[in-house]
Amino acid sequence: MSFASPLWLLALPLVLLPLWPRQQSSRLTSSLIPLSALPKSWRVQLLRLQPPLAVLTLLLLILALAGAQRVKKEEQALRQGIDVMLTLDVSASLGARDIAPDRLSVARNTAADFLAQRQNDRIGVILFAGVPTLLSPPVLDKGPLLQQLRQLKPDRLGSGTALGDALAAALDRLKDSDAASKVVILLTDGASNRGRVTPHTAALAAAALGVRVYTIGFGSDQGGEVPLDGTGRIARLDDGTPLLSALEEEPLREMARLSGGRYFRASSADLLRQVYAKIDALETSPLQIREIATEIPYRPILLTVCAVLLLIDLLLFRLLLRLQPTGFGSQLTSAATLIALILLLLPEKVSAPYGESSGPPLTLALALDTSASMATKEEGTSRLERAKTLIETLLQRLPQAQMALLPFAGEAMLQVPLTREHDALRYFLNRLQPRSLDAPGSAPEEALRAAAHLLENVAGERMILLFSDGERTLAAEPPTIPPGVTIHTLPLGRHPGPLVDGNGTPLLGPDGTPLQSLPDPERLQRLATASGGLFLADANGLPTLKPLLEQLARQAPPAAPLSGMWLILPLFLLLVRHLPWRRRTSSLLAVAIALVACSQETAPGPTTFHRAETLVTTQPGSAIDTFAIAASFLQGERRGVALYNQGSLLLQQEEPAAARSVLEEALRLLPGDPDVRNNLLIALSSAPPENGSIGNKQRGEDDAEGGGESLSHDEALQLLDALRPDLDAPASDRQERFTPVVLKEW
């Protein structure tokens, strides 16, 4: 057993007060025989139990105030994960059936099995044919990614096979990774015949960035007929003979050799599984043993027993047996007992974020309008930027919620499947632009239907948030939205405005007149009302999340028992009951002083932390100093949170140098925390980057035949920046924009 606030144990001598001899009060009795000489009836025996029970009640209450807890220690084996980009060819030739049932089915299922067993690694997926497409950046939560991966179908992402561009796109995702080991696994069944970067140059960039590339040539030795579509027709040459997919192995060998990886040939499903098993064995992570201490508080049990003992005291000794005198003093002590009992049973508000593991699961599908009208500005901000700000607020306020992102225009697209990896969602959200989707127009009902289908098999509370101006431009009748999912709508436009292109130039109609956006908030209100959701607009018609967040707060996890400083009051009332009758005033004063002295130790760190929170908006300078003081009292993750808040406020006050050291220490205490890393990156960005290059990995003698050709680290980064793969944002938006997240709560 250990104690969170051990100074309260100094109050333990007070538990003997019920045994202290008292002055006999004048009591009306029918005999002068001393009480000790009375017959030993059961009523007298019960009366003798009252002082020990009172001692036990006080003892348990003081132990609860001292934070009695059991510390459970266990060892856990941890592996330091690596970052992997799985790069899969999904061109039409992957539909070939020379490997049953077809090449892509075997490739996707084997890759999914590989992902599932790499529990400690962050893994992302890029699909490619003529152009690369990002399915997911590296994430730890692979559940949604596995589901999406197993549903892949052959696709024509531009005709041909662009091996160099696909590898460059994977490198672009890994170039900023801080993982100790970075790996690309590239699977293809064809020859490189498209792209702006050759496989050779992309492999040199991988070597410069310290990324190993494992290449897999997949397909049977005799080749496979390339299907044209789902009808079973196959591609044929001019003379009518079937077109067979041809694997070109030399570029794959060179890519692996230059980057320090390996090339594998897989001509069957069994061989492909063996290839992944070999890669899994080659890319092992270092094993670490960490001792995990779990604190299991005894406070709920102690307070429950205290409440039961007080209830026995009231019902048995004072009401049923009436063994106490009926004067004013007795009534006062009975009232003190009753008040103490009520205080122990009262709940305490808990400010835990909705969606924590102890609360009900929460799933949100975010349907975001990206039609041309979302570029229209109101009050200096485009509608889409306003939506992004609202979604960022959701990500911060609901850190444990599972979310999906469905941008839509004339049709909807699932861009981020359901995940708790909010960094992945932020990645795509920040790169969305008006008219990002090829489908013209705006169809909010179609987006809601797609979101409802996504949530139909999800357990727990689920809801759809529609961010749109409500405008529908498709002539077709809106589809029926499946029932059973709550829809909340946020109106992003109040007034008509001109439609503009990406440069802000007004768009013109066929007759040369400027095109106008016509918001339809009434449509949004009808959609929300029909599903029992909220139309999230303030009095001025602007979108607001406040009603939704307040509703979720009311559904937060159940309140915890009364604790902390509030327990001092019932303890004080119970001690007053048992004070000696002589010198009652001085005794009362002594008890009050003892309790105040003990309470000074009650969590000085949390108290100071909460005081700092109140100063953030009014006195940020004082809040910085107060968070620093709180950190000096705290340990572990709580100390890290206080340091994080201190460093973030220093960033706000434009003191990045001071913030850097504070945030570095916070990151050591909160390893992997995205907000700490985000703000530390802001602080570090104030210093010029270190020059130099990372040399190539160790290579065999064969590498020398290439004439020593290599790229420096900076040259590799410039190459990736110049490439600007299609999956990335425009050049004007290449630079990551980070917004400091100021406050954290534990």
Image (cartoon, rainbow, N blue to C red):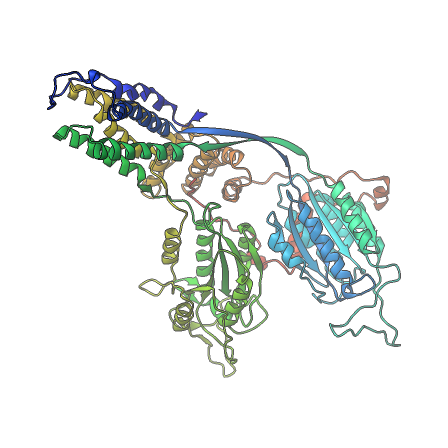
Q: In which quadrant of the rendered image does the C terminus lie?
A: top left
Residue sitting at the far bottom = 511
- Relative to 351, 34 lies left or right: left
Name the foreground residue: 507 vs 539: 539
**Picture quadrant where residue 542 is located:** bottom left
Compared with 149, 71 (above or below) is: above
Name the foreground residue: 114 vs 686: 114
Q: Position of residue 180 (x, y in %)?
A: 66, 38
The reply to whether residue 634 is in sight is yes
Name the foreground residue: 139 vs 134: 139
- Relative to 559, 202 lies left or right: right
Q: Position of residue 561 (x, y in %)?
A: 36, 39
**Picture quadrant where residue 308 is located:** top left
The reply to whether residue 197 is in sight is no
- Relative to 35, 158 lies left or right: right
Compared with 466, 607 (above or below) is: above
Q: Please name the residue shown 47% across and 64% down the image.
A: 485
Q: Please name the residue shown 21% across and 16% down the image.
A: 36
Q: Please name the residue shown 67% across and 52% down the image.
A: 720
Q: Please name the residue shown 83% across and 44% down the image.
A: 707
Compared with 559, 170 (above or below) is: below
Q: Position of residue 412 (x, y in %)?
A: 55, 68
Name the foreground residue: 162 vs 469: 469
**Picture quadrant where residue 281 is located:** top right
Q: Position of residue 737 (x, y in %)?
A: 51, 51
Total labels drawn: 0
